[in-house]
Amino acid sequence: TIYQANKDQIRNPRWIYPGQVFVLPEGNAAWEDTEKTDPPG
């Protein structure tokens, strides 16, 4: 997740401040897996 990749910059994942720049990960096997599903409809 974005939070896991940027823990050194994000103190509280519920608060993102203007000007913060984060790494957008492509994937890492050490991170928690999440199931991808199609949206309803």
Image (spheres, helix red, strand yellow):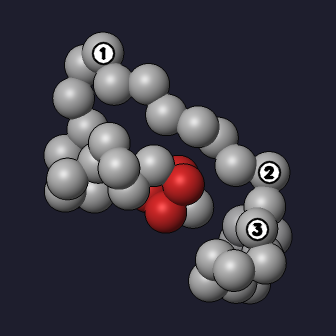
Looking at numbered disc 1 in the image, what kind of residue is underneath it? Gly
25 to the left or right of 2: right
Give the residue displayed 78% in from the left and 78% down from the top.
29
Q: Is residue 41 visible in the rendered structure shown here?
A: no
Q: Is 39 placed above or below 36 here?
A: above
**Residue 21, horizontal then vertical, whole percent:** 44, 25
Q: Which mark is residue 26?
A: 2
**Total count of labels:** 3
In the image shown, does 30 or 34 lie closer to the viewer? Answer: 30
Q: Which mark is residue 36?
A: none
**Residue 11, horizontal then vertical, whole percent:** 20, 53
Q: Which mark is residue 19?
A: 1
Q: Is residue 13 visible in the rendered structure shown here?
A: yes
Q: Which mark is residue 28?
A: 3
Question: Do the numbered discs 1 and 2 sit on residues whose CB atoms are within 8 Å?
Answer: no
Give the residue displayed 21% in from the left and 29% down from the top.
17
Give the residue displayed 45% in from the left and 49% down from the top.
6
Gap between marks 1 and 2 measured at Cα: 22 Å
Q: Secondary structure at mark 1?
A: loop
Q: Secondary structure at mark 2?
A: loop
Give the residue displayed 58% in from the left and 37% down from the top.
23
Q: Secondary structure at mark 3?
A: loop
**Residue 39, horizontal then vertical, whole percent:** 72, 67
Q: Residues within 10 Å of mark 1 (few under 14, many from 20)?
A: few
Image quarter in which the C terminus is found: bottom right
Gap between marks 3 and 1 measured at Cα: 25 Å
Q: Quadrant of residue 14?
A: bottom left
Looking at numbered disc 2 in the image, what kind of residue is underneath it? Glu
